[in-house]
Amino acid sequence: MKKFIKKFNSGFSIVESMVAIAVVTLAITSATSVVQNSFKSVQITRARIQAMYLASEAIEFGRNLRDSAIVSGSTGNNFSGSVNSFANECKNDGCFVDVLSNINKYGKCNNDSCGDIYLTNTKYTSDNSEGNKKTVFNRRVYTELSGDGQELKVNVTVSYTVRGFSEEIVLDSYLMNHE
């Protein structure tokens, strides 16, 4: 009696294995690329939102100066005192503002690093003291007082670079002397 032995070709050939590995590698690489681009988009969007808040904060700084002058009765027919000083400091080269310092402060820009924003443990500041970490943001405030002294244009430019993407956020506000 003869025994018939069936020979089965089971398993994968080396070519089939290589094709399968290539397909899996391509799928993993594509997924990784999508995830990396998503993280980049999230970081850019987060920076854009923070830049908008920093620009709005500087506009509010100007409004606060105006409103404080009105409440104290020191404006009269034209802006005067702190508003006038703010307008003069920031009119040509711009100025920095430090909204959350103990005393609201601002100062004329004299160099390229003027307006750099630093992070303390709890807040953003223009104070570059040791221990404060430099952020990606730079904020400059420019002002222009109207000829009749009744209107102050406040222009804020916040620039930043995140993961090779650079952008400037620009906000303008016109503050009227309501006295």
Image (cartoon, rainbow, N blue to C red):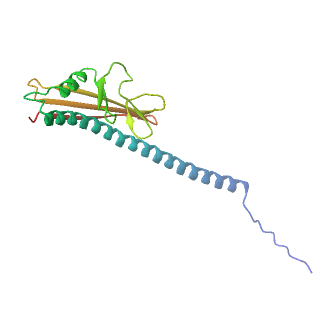
Query: In the rendered view, does 37 fall on the left or right side of 15?
Result: left
Q: Residue furthest bottom?
A: 1
Residue at the image position 39 percent from the left and 40 percent from the top: 47
Q: Nearer the viewer, residue 24 or 4?
A: 24
Q: Position of residue 51 (x, y in %)?
A: 34, 38
Q: Nearer the viewer, residue 176 or 22?
A: 176
Residue 167 falls in image quadrant: top left
Q: Nearer the viewer, residue 105 or 164?
A: 105
Q: Residue furthest top?
A: 110
Q: Is residue 97 above or below residue 10?
A: above
Residue 80 falls in image quadrant: top left
Q: Is residue 129 above or below residue 14?
A: above
Q: Position of residue 75 (x, y in %)?
A: 12, 30
Residue at the image position 39 percent from the left and 39 percent from the top: 123
Q: Residue furthest right?
A: 1
Residue at the image position 92 percent from the left and 81 percent from the top: 1
Q: Position of residue 11 (x, y in %)?
A: 74, 63
Q: Which quarter of the rendered picture does the C terminus lie within?
A: top left
Query: In the rendered view, does 46 fall on the left or right side of 67?
Result: right
Q: Is residue 91 above or below residue 163?
A: above
Q: Position of residue 159 (x, y in %)?
A: 35, 32
